Image: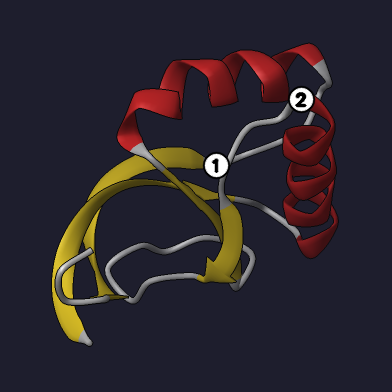
Amino acid sequence: MARVRVPSVVVSFPSTEAALACEDVCERRGLAGRLIPLPGEISAGCGLAWKAAPELREALADALDAEDVAYEAMTYVCLLEFVREGA
C-alpha cells in the first residue's frame, strides 16, 4: 500500500461532545466521513475532528447548523492516507 496526500475537509470542534454529535448527525444524514485525531496543523478546543471529502463541505455545514452542532472551523487540508496500489 502506498501513502498519498488526499484533499479533505477537516471540521474542528470546541468539545468532544460536539465532535460526537457531528458523527451522529452525519450517520443519520448519510454524509460520509469519520472522526480522526486533530491534525497538528489545526488548533481547536478538542482533540477530535471530522474528516470528509471536500465536496461535502457545504452539506456538512448545512447539517451541523440545522442541528445546532457547534464547530470551530472547516479547513481544507491534504492528509496522508494509505491507498491500495492499483485501486
The residue at the point 48 percent across, 70 percent down is: 38
Q: Is residue 35 above or below residue 32?
A: below
Q: Amino acid at mark 1?
A: Glu
Determine which quarter of the picture holds residue 3: bottom left
Classify mark 1: helix, strand or loop: loop
Q: x, y percentage for residue 41?
A: 27, 68
Q: Which residue is mark 1?
A: 72
State how far apart marks 1 and 2 are (Cα): 21 Å
- Residue at figure coordinates x 76%, y 25% from the top left: 29
- Name which of mark 1 and mark 2 comes first in the sequence: 2
For the point 22% across and 87% down, the residue is 1
Q: Quadrant of residue 66?
A: top right
Which image quadrant for residue 31?
top right
Q: How is the image coloured?
A: secondary structure
Label placed on residue 29: 2
Q: Position of residue 62 (x, y in %)?
A: 62, 13
In this image, 47 relative to 25: left or right? left
Q: Is residue 75 left or right of residue 12?
A: left
Label 2 element class: helix
